Amino acid sequence: MGIARKLADGLTNVITGLGTRADARTARTYVRNILSPDQIEDAFQASPMLRKAIRMPAIDRIRAWRNWQADDKQIEALEAEEERHQLQIKVKRAEVLRGLGGGALILVTAGDPALPINVTAAKGLIAVNVVSRWNLAGQDWVEDLSRPDYGTPTYWTMTGTRGQTPLHPSRVVCFRGESLPGLRSGNWDNEFWGLGRVPSLIEPAQNLEEALNTFNAMIKDALNVDIGITGLLDLVATSDGEAQLMKRLSLMVQGSSVFQGRLYDLGNSEGKGGEKIDRHQVSWTGIPDLIRTYAEAFAAAAEIPVTRLWGTSAKGLNATGEGDDRNYKEMVDEGRDTETKPCLDQIDAALIPSALGSRPPEVWWRFGDLDVPSDKEETDRFKVFVEAAEKVQMSGAIPDAAFAKAYQNSLVENGWMPGLEGALAEIPEDERFGLSSDDDGSDPSALQAQQREGGDLSSLPAPGIGEEAPPRRRLQANDAEPRTLYVRRDVVNVADLKAWARAQGLPELQDGLHVTIAHSRTPIDWMKIDGEWNQDEKGQLTIQPGGVRIVEPLGNRTAVLLFTSSALSWRHESIMRAGASHDYPEYQPHISLTGEPVDLSAVEPYRGKIVLGPEIFEELEDGGAPTGDRPFDDALTGRAGRRARGAIGGKFDPTQPRDRHGRWIPAGRRAFIDAAAKGATNNAKQIEVGRVGAKAKAALEARGIRLKGDGVALDPGLVRHIVVRHSAERGGQRNVSGADIASASSLLNSARTLRASRPARNGSQRFIALTQSRGESVYSVFEVRKKAVTLVTMWKKG
């Protein structure tokens, strides 16, 4: 039995060749490919594919460079120092040398180069230069295993035309190749510099380029033509015959180029003795696949995707190449972190003190992103972040101040809100992170207890009653104190509008036709408003003919010309960004025409050009409308001498609440608010006093706060809470008045800061609005309810 098995094994080996000298694998051995510097340089210059495989990772490592984390002046100085030394370009050259076997950056300062580098004492970094590893030689290699610098030279020498220059290791930033495994002892120099990439890439590069060159040589044989001539040997035996043959072939070529055809001899009448022409077409079947195989083998050796190396799209069904690209970027990131960053850290030991005079511990940097996401990708990422942050905050696990710091840092570090860091730096820390009071009204049971306390609430003034209007004064040239603001442009071509009005049968137009741009009861610093760049040299602005034009009632006006103007809308928005408030949710350019009764059913809108004069800035009179212009006549004494429902003693009341359509709430409803605050109607429903503006709504949604309705409401019990807790000076707070409470919608829409707050016990979202008013900080906490946001509490700080 054993003999049979032995016989079978022997026959199998003989037939297959396995285990015998016929086995092809027994002849394959691996030999270290040691290349001289000249051979490496020749390969790098002569092989385009090899050169690309070396340069591409080096370029990608420094392409996004790095982002400094420091204050603006420090960053400016550091970037200027990098630019002075062309550091990014030189690091790229050093990375290319890393791939070729190694290189170094030499840091040059004043003083002895054999001594440790001291940029501060040397008064700056003089130069940064790139050298190859073959220009350097390590001396006195450290062989003591107990030392952390084991395997490094005690000093370097650099050979030049003037001899050898000793260099201290702190001045030589080495860009080393992949570390050798160290399985056997070798040359210290080779062990230190590691393995370059050329030896492992040269054979795959040669295979690929040989395949391409072979294919290129075959192209000229793509179509071969064979011509058979009868009696050819006899013909070329004589000089006359050879000349006749050459002339014949020349004529054949000329005929082919002129007539796109070839003339040849058919022979005698019997068809004998004629010329014969054969054509042979070469087939390329299989050759592209063979070249692609060589290309993939080279790409695998270079660790670069074929799509990136060749600049082509991914091949195959449903192939996107995203996986290959992601793997390559991970490889580049790993190289940046483990190889490039240590080199840059050594450079920074000299660069930062050279730029800043010292090395502050708070200055650091990180690599830039290899990919710049699209707007949609960044928007989706921001949306996911906001939703996740909202859930974290809703959990209540993180205190508000800590959450605010982390949230703001995330926005700054991800660059989602440019300029945020500088804007936040201008806000005191207690306002930036600690928007809170001794009681924010988050405990309903505490509110109910306060409502049962009773007490004299007569100190609560009715909105606008008993408060003297600030005196109107002229703006001094050097006076930047915040003040109320009314901005308008008067209509210049009034005659054109009046002619149109007469043709349409409208009553005589009112005097002072104008367009209101801003109407802010919130005081602001006028000097923060940028100049208007849409106007001409005369300060005028022309609305060209055509476009959207509508004539309809608006507010207390029976006829108003509505139109669109991006210039006016942007101007209004810029003033709002400077801190102004606006009583309506949206800005609509319009010209008030008349308040007289009029039938607009047959009126065609004015479609001509509208010429507006220079901007006029005025303070509001009595906190309401400027002299000579009363856009809210429904809150003033009427034309017939009757007091309007919203008027108090015939005076304009800037704190009078409004409904969701912007109309003034009658005085009777104001009394309702007062009564609610005094506890007379504790069971009354909340009343709406305004709307959340589009700008505030968008800001809230960006912070993850979803409104269920856009109304702003007051609740009697909560009004009482505000009065009890915050209507007297306490804990650094200032008095909150009835006017402050009634103007909740204006405070919300003009808020400088909006952020999420701790949710109510029932899970309802809450947010805090911080508004600057007359030198005071007003903090208003709102809760999102079914149809409106309700004011929960309010406090002020001077």
Image: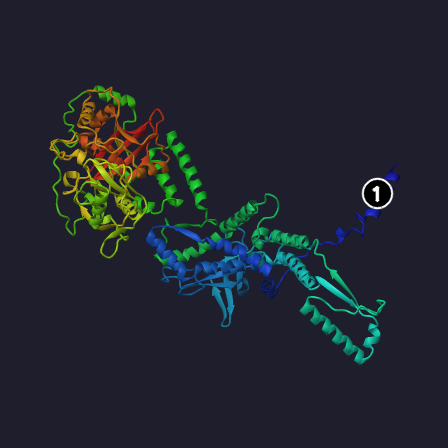
| Front-lying residue, 548 or 143 | 548
SS under mark 1: helix
Q: Circle 1 sits on which residue? A: 9
- On the image, the x and y values in percent for residue 470 come to 13, 40
Residue at position x 70%, y 70% in the image:
255
Classify residue 388 by image quadrant: top left
> Image quadrant for the C terminus?
top left
Residue under the image location 45 percent in, 55 percent down = 346
Residue sitting at the far bottom: 239
Query: Amino acid under label 1?
Result: Asp
- Can residue 210 be seen in the rendering of this structure? yes
Q: How is the image coloured?
A: rainbow
Position in image of residue 366 (x %, y %): 43, 49
- State the image coordinates of residue 436 (x, y, percent, origin top left): 28, 33
Q: Is residue 99 above or below residue 397?
A: below
**Neighbours of disc 1 within 10 Å: few (<14), some (14-19), many (20+):** few
Closer to us: 165 or 241:
241
Going by the image, does 63 lie left or right of 268? left
- State whether residue 304 appears in this view: no
Residue 266 in percent (x, y) is at: 80, 68
Quarter of the rendering occupied by the N terminus: top right
Q: Is residue 787 above or below residue 148?
A: above
Q: Quadrant of residue 279?
A: bottom right
Callout count = 1
